[in-house]
Image (spheres, rainbow, N blue to C red):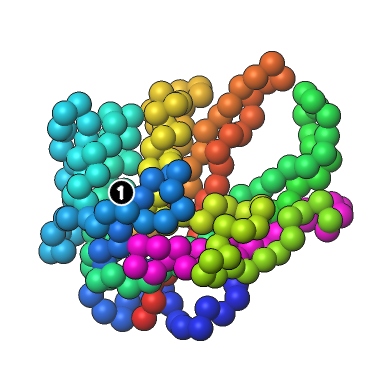
Amino acid sequence: MKTLGWMFGCLSLIGCVLDSEPVGVESDTEAASSGTSEGSASASSTQGTATEESGGIETSGGDVLPPECSGDFAASWDAWSNLQMMQEGRAYVYTRVETVETGGQACEPEPDYICDLRTTITVTGGMVTSRELVATPRDDAPAETCPDAYSESGDSIGSHDGGAPPLTLDALYQGCCDVAQMAGGFGEDFGQAEFEVDEMGVLSRCSDLLCDDCGCFSGTDYSIEDLAFAM
């Protein structure tokens, strides 16, 4: 990852101590490219409690989620909201990891080439302030089959194709919830969405399964790595 000009605190529960007390970074929607409203949960809370309201689930951060996003997913969103408040508005960085397939013919089981994409995004004050992409061809894929690497900041953010969209982590939560709604919720039943969390309970993977005349394949499928706050 390119050095961002300042150090980031490690979020590991063991062997690494955050420099100061926990945030209140604002959230937005998956369609937006930057932040929205500030969470309202108490900074003294270590785990928010989701409660039913108007047919939805309200998180400790004030987000009202549909029933498909209740339970463990709502608890994870609470964990993220509380972590932000504990960090008192510090900037954070995360890397979204996914693959892109190129070439191949319709209904063929294997693509011609696969590229691994790592998009590193910095969020400051609830707004995306930088985006960087590193694309690596897998196996014998020619380098030109992968998107070109880039580094964006300021007005240039969002100007390149390829890589993950410039979104806050709040927006990724909302987007993953949207995926679950379309898939009939999170679960292990065929066609349902899936998510995973890291050791702090924060979203670390979101995926679903799409089907067409050729069969079923991954639709949304990404992981989140190297989440850290500025010191």
Q: Quadrant of residue 219?
A: top right
The reply to whether residue 227 is in sight is: no
Instruction: Give x and y (percent) for residue 210.
Output: 58, 26
**Quadrant that contains the N terminus:** bottom right
For image coordinates 63% across by 54% down, the residue present is 163
Q: Is residue 205 above or below residue 153?
A: above
Foreground residue, 101 or 152? Answer: 152
Foreground residue, 165 or 16? Answer: 165
Residue that label 1 marks: 77
Q: Relative to residue 150, is residue 74 drawn left or right?
A: left
Q: Is residue 61 above or below residue 186?
A: below
Q: Relative to residue 137, is residue 120 drawn left or right?
A: left
Foreground residue, 34 or 169? Answer: 34
Instruction: Give x and y (percent) for residue 160.
Output: 65, 58
Q: Is residue 127 above or below residue 91?
A: above
The reply to whether residue 128 is in sight is: yes
Q: Relative to residue 132, is residue 41 drawn left or right?
A: left
Q: Relative to residue 208, is residue 118 drawn left or right?
A: right
Q: Which span of residues is magenta-colored?
A: 118-143
Foreground residue, 89 or 229? Answer: 89
Q: Secondary structure at mark 1?
A: helix
Q: Quadrant of residue 187?
A: top left
**Quadrant that contains the C terminus:** bottom left
For image coordinates 38% across by 37% down, the residue present is 177
Instruction: Give x and y (percent) for residue 131.
Output: 55, 64
Q: Amino acid at mark 1?
A: Trp
**Label 1 Cα neighbours within 10 Å, binned few <14 / some 14-19 / many ≥20:** many
Whether the magenta-drawn stretch holds residue 76 is answered as no
For image coordinates 22% across by 31% down, the residue present is 56
Task: Name the residue furthest top.
Answer: 213
For image coordinates 83% across by 29% down, the residue present is 105
Q: Main secondary structure of the magenta part?
A: strand
